[in-house]
Image (tube, grey):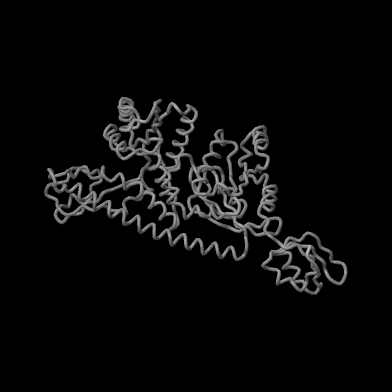
Amino acid sequence: MKIRIRIRIWSRRCGKCRRHAALPPHPAACYGPPRLDLKALIADPNHKAERVFLVGVELKAGSPWETADSMTELAELARTAGSNIVGEGTQKLESINPATFIGGGKAEEFAKTCRELGVDTVIFDDELSPAQTRNLEKVFAGTVMDRTALILDIFAQRARTREGKLQVELAQLQYLLPRLTRYWTHLSRQRGGMGAIGGEGESQLEADRRKISERIEKLDEELVIVRRQRATQRAGRQRNQWPLASIVGYTNAGKSTLFNKLTGATVLAEDKLFATLDPTTRRLRLPTNQNVLLSDTVGFIRKLPHRLVEAFKATLEEVVEADLLLHVVDCSHPQAEDHIRAVHAVLEEIHAGDKPTMLVLNKIDRAEPDLVARWQMNHPRAVAVSARTGAGFEELMAELGTALRPVREFLELAIPHARAGVVAKLHEVAQVVERDYSGESARFKARIPPHLHAEFAEFVVKEL
């Protein structure tokens, strides 16, 4: 469940020291430069389920229901990562304790509870500083992680494509870099005094920081190539002048189920947070005989770490470049309005807050009719659907056809009956408004994409 960071120490003389999982005191007989194995930073998805204890804070400026809802979401994240939740606790505070996040006495109380319950890992509902993590691990005498590390672990389990794995590794290393100090506490400073050189712990720390920084630079370079490839793909799509619609929304709102139902794709859709991580784009044919590209993207969440947004810019470019955003909302969720605000906050962060947006109220099959009616009263331009049953899809497709209507030439055409191939092509690429097959030629009123004007130029009677 947690990000498993393992330090491997290599030596020419000590066979026992080849792997220090728990980082015991470094044997005096062992020498040789220790090295950080960056490949071991990625989480192991095959580990056994761990017993975890959740910790949250209710600040004076907040409210009890906000804390309770955030803790419920943290529990869902932990279960998604494969953990067994054995307990949780919260504390009311005026402000965050800079040393231990929660109060020292409360930390000791929770530590005692964790020992009684046999807890493996303690998870905090907010991001901890490196110093807070180090101090809390001393108090709990075990592993302590925060919400950011938990989300990173889920992302590491879910990434399937090379692009996704690159982005996850970049976010993990950026998270790890300021926290390296605690992994080398067993190598203490051996010399001191004015102008003295530090011991193995200090020199090794600098070596590992340099190695991780170099890897981060390499990942940045590779992701620049990924963005360039995506730009090339978009340019190819734009040659067809097909509009792009991106599905966005809070995680587990039913985005992938809706995407699969509309396009016939087979994107993974599970009742778990962040079931979809890698973006997928498919063609969608609208009732107006118009081709649209529909893209499914990673779900958003409250307290989404900024470093994740930065790392996933290559993926989120599909959102930035979209002509229309389909904001999918689970209208049956009691905190749906908060989810909408969280999604808007992330869209603002990636500079997509001013994009044309269609609100899609999903899971109406799980919501009371009165609740759906209130949603539609408060959001009159929203479309209510059920991605599971297909209810409301006709209205959704009609709204998509209206919102994504491209610039088309409205023409009247006369096509001889013998040119059946041209008639078939017209029905394939154009929106035919009227047709009349009487007379020597079939006459049509149709909206045609401008780049196909030359194919029908000889049959144009007039522009409408």
Relative height, residue 404 to residue 117 (above, below): below
Residue 61 in percent (x, y) is at: 45, 28
Residue 123 falls left or right of residue 422: left
Q: Nearer the viewer, residue 143 or 322?
A: 322
Residue at figure coordinates x 71%, y 64% from the top left? 428
Is 256 placed above or below 435 here?
Answer: above
Q: Is residue 28 above or below residue 288?
A: above
Identify the residue shown where x is 45% and y is 51%.
Answer: 312
Which residue occupies 44% across, 36% down? 74
Q: Residue furthest front?
A: 194
Q: Quadrant of residue 83?
A: top left
Please identify the quadrant where the C terminus is shown.
bottom right
Image location of residue 401, percent across then percent down: 68, 53
Residue 439 coordinates in the image, percent (x, y):
88, 69
Residue 339 location, quadrant: top right
From the viewer's perspective, tell me whether residue 32 is left or right of residue 125: left
Q: In percent of the image, x 68 and y 45: which residue is there?
A: 392
| Residue furthest right in the image | 439
The residue lying toward the viewer, choosing from 158 and 165, is 165
Measured as percent of width and height from the top left, residue 213 is found at 31, 54
Residue 389: quadrant of the picture: top right
